Amino acid sequence: MPDRFEILHKDLAGRIGRLSTPHGTIETPLLMPVVNPHLPLITPGELAGIGADMIITNSYIINQDPDLKTRAMERGLHELLGFEGPIMTDSGAFQLSVYGDIDVQPMEILDFQFAIKSDIAVPLDIPTPPDVARDRAESELQTTEVRLQEAAAAADRSALLAGPVQGSTYPDLRERAGKFARDLGFDVYPVGGVVPLMEAYRYRDLVDVVVAAKKGLGSGVPVHLFGAGHPMIFALAAAMGCDLFDSAAYALYARQDRYLTVRGTWKLEEMNYLPCSCPVCQAHTLQELVDSPHKTRDLARHNLYVSLQEIRLVKQSIREGSLWDLLETRCRSHPRMLDGLKRLCSQGKWLEGLDTASKSTFFYLSPESASRPEVIRHARRVDRICLQGNVLITDDPDADKAGYDHVLNFKPPFGPYPAELSETYPFNAEVPEDADDAALDQAVKITKQLVRANPGARFTFRLKIGNLGERLKQS
Amino acid sequence: MPDRFEILHKDLAGRIGRLSTPHGTIETPLLMPVVNPHLPLITPGELAGIGADMIITNSYIINQDPDLKTRAMERGLHELLGFEGPIMTDSGAFQLSVYGDIDVQPMEILDFQFAIKSDIAVPLDIPTPPDVARDRAESELQTTEVRLQEAAAAADRSALLAGPVQGSTYPDLRERAGKFARDLGFDVYPVGGVVPLMEAYRYRDLVDVVVAAKKGLGSGVPVHLFGAGHPMIFALAAAMGCDLFDSAAYALYARQDRYLTVRGTWKLEEMNYLPCSCPVCQAHTLQELVDSPHKTRDLARHNLYVSLQEIRLVKQSIREGSLWDLLETRCRSHPRMLDGLKRLCSQGKWLEGLDTASKSTFFYLSPESASRPEVIRHARRVDRICLQGNVLITDDPDADKAGYDHVLNFKPPFGPYPAELSETYPFNAEVPEDADDAALDQAVKITKQLVRANPGARFTFRLKIGNLGERLKQS
């Protein structure tokens, strides 16, 4: 099997990648609008015009409808939907999660996806919801794993094959499930069963689940965060290494008169202005949109524009190494999003292991910035600095440096670093005028590591930052 | 003089207002694109199409050009520029600040603005730069004040008259200048001489200057932040009570291949994607934009779309009382913006006095949220709570409440509040799972105030939040 996924650029655990499918190569991170094969609110042709390079539809719905099924079998999925680019198909697992039972066999629906020329086929897994008892999560995962084995063995691999990762809200099960799927060898790895977490704004649990799955999957394979369609989540999800997203949200929210933004959702009736420049919001006043005979369609188009725009911003941020800065902004749209960022901070070592070493500029933007991979990395390496004799640690450029064998600059959150690196990333960081507690705590911790690693050196501190001496003594 | 400015909605020190001019009523906050009367990069007619309700141009440039001057005198400014809405005119003070000398007398250029039917005329003030010696700032301010007196006395008031506020980076001079202008009675109050602060990202000093000017001016009059044209600053400026902005930035940046966003600026060559849905970014790929024969014009149009969109978002945020939430997001685009927000936090009492009491939802999004006006207000009022007998303060809904005369809930950053208000704003705040130090510090401070105010009551604490008891004892 040739390697269908190529990683071009990295930032945090996120990346820009290229995924080859039978109907063309796409660039990730990528958002697939969900197309309802019965009545698409926006036709696939229009979706392409708005900027969708790939779509996803439901093979189970097609399979259940005799007319759609016949046309799909005869002419193929792409002609049925009128879309030339890659199309992923879902298997009915979502229907299974909603209705508890579906009317098709696992291998039957998988073979059907191959038959209608899906670009990415998904085996029928069991989407276990969050918070179920552990034995249920385990036994459902076991069923999913058996089906993945069958799928991996039987697939002809003309299409790409997805290996879903389940395990409810048990991180160890998610990690095991990721490793199991990875060992079988699929082309794309959807993390499933997370929609209830996102609907309930449980972003902290979402981080636990996704990071665990990623640990099991390793960093080289493409990951699909199944059901993630709200633009407020894309930066966080991409930072964890999710590459594919699918949006039913653009249409579902539109049907409820909901207007998506990168900071959340408004009901149309709550709005007084249209704070967007997309073609829909430029062509209408708010009142015209409210009164439009095509209101739902117009809203869906706006929702899609803003979603695809955010994907492009995430990609731009990965390219320039500023994805953390975007996280700082995006995770301040809601306290639960901040919880998610804090949880990601607690995975600092994992993130540091994946993050690239050199970027453009380090901006210190909140206490969470003290947990950036660059800081973790400096903390990990600081005891490699070998010092002897008299060592000056100072944040004062005018300090008298005569008589010292080594001079280290001091800047929270990094603490001490060799003075000759002060114009080098990340020590050229832009930091606030006054360091916050999180930055000072990190700086003190790193300073202590350095001092401990060099018992033969005599340290002198010349620090302008208030009561830092006290902090150093205390700790 | 009739009251030409009406305030409709308020949030923080910001507001949505209506300003009446000879050429129509505009809604504030409002951005006036700067039009160069010689060669507008985008014609005023097109500006109107993009969404500009008002523009600003330079009367000094018109006055210096015999041809423009003649046409403006004969047919008026609006026909000269081809714009039907309100037009503000600058006086040449900017040229004075750049070239040190200009070729016109103060009353001459003011009369000229009236003669050509400007909607808002600006006397020729002295735009003192930041950081000058105090005696220079004072003497230049004196000159400005003499000119304001002459202008106020002479103006026929068919146009609105602006009373600029100078004073360099001396807050006491800014406040005095604001009061002086306010006492003379103008229609609009530009805060001038701040462009160098914004160019150098000195947002902390900008907050000092603007808040001081606002304190002098009072809250009822419209304020123009002269030279503020980058969308990243609009939320912060509006939160301080600035109502009018002017953008030369949209064109100046475009001429340097710079692409504006609400989080900063990109050089076109640094970009790999166009993360925007405006008509320009929808009609072009990045490469097409780079290669466009109209590149500068296209970029200027994008810059203007994104700027006007941000003004609408600021207005939407004021309407729903969520301007602080927008600040939390916007001030995380750069550490210097965060410095600005922190400085605004230090003006908590001033802000609390202006902020409206009831809003939608309180989101705790960073340590800065602990300084929100709602928290300051609760701290100011908590000692009005009269307690006697046994008082329980708890964050545990399951705590046994039997035997207590009063039960108060406890939630950082508010600390204790009457349990019956827990579903009421702001105590229904959405807060992170784990309170940060700033929230805990505020909660402890407010708790101590309550305890001190009720020496006759016996307090019992049942708190689940870790080591809060220790914090309470320590402090």
Image: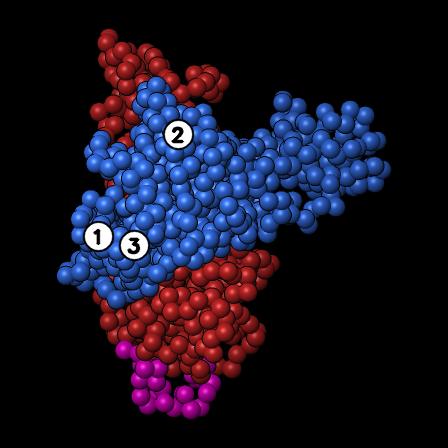
Chain colours: A red, B blue
Crowd class of label 3 (few under 14; some 14 to 19; many from 20; radius 10 Å): many
Residue under mark 3: which chain is it in? B
Crowd class of label 2 (few under 14; some 14 to 19; many from 20; radius 10 Å): many
Name the kind of residue labelled 1 in the image. Answer: Thr
Q: Indicate the position of residue B110 as horizontal and vertical percent values.
A: 33, 41
Residue at the extreme top: A403
Magenta span covers which residues? A61-84
How many dots with numbers?
3
The residue to which callout 2 is attached is: B145
Q: Indicate the position of residue A150 as horizontal and vertical percent values.
A: 40, 72
Residue B70 circle label: 1
The residue to which callout 3 is attached is: B77
Q: Nearer the viewer, residue A214 or A412?
A: A412
Q: Nearer the viewer, residue B209 or B259?
A: B209
- Tell me what residue is drawn at x 20 percent, y 60 percent: B289
Secondary structure mostly seen in the magenta stretch = helix
- Looking at the rendered structure, the secondary structure element under dot 1 is helix
Q: Nearer the viewer, residue A133 or B404?
A: B404
Q: Earlier in the sequence, mark 1 or mark 2?
A: 1
Q: Earlier in the sequence, mark 2 or mark 3?
A: 3
Q: Nearer the viewer, residue A263 or B141?
A: B141
- Tell me what residue is drawn at x 59 percent, y 60 percent: A132
Residue A252 against residue A376 in the figure, above or below: below
Distance CA(mark 1)–CA(mark 3): 11 Å
Distance CA(mark 2)–CA(mark 3): 27 Å
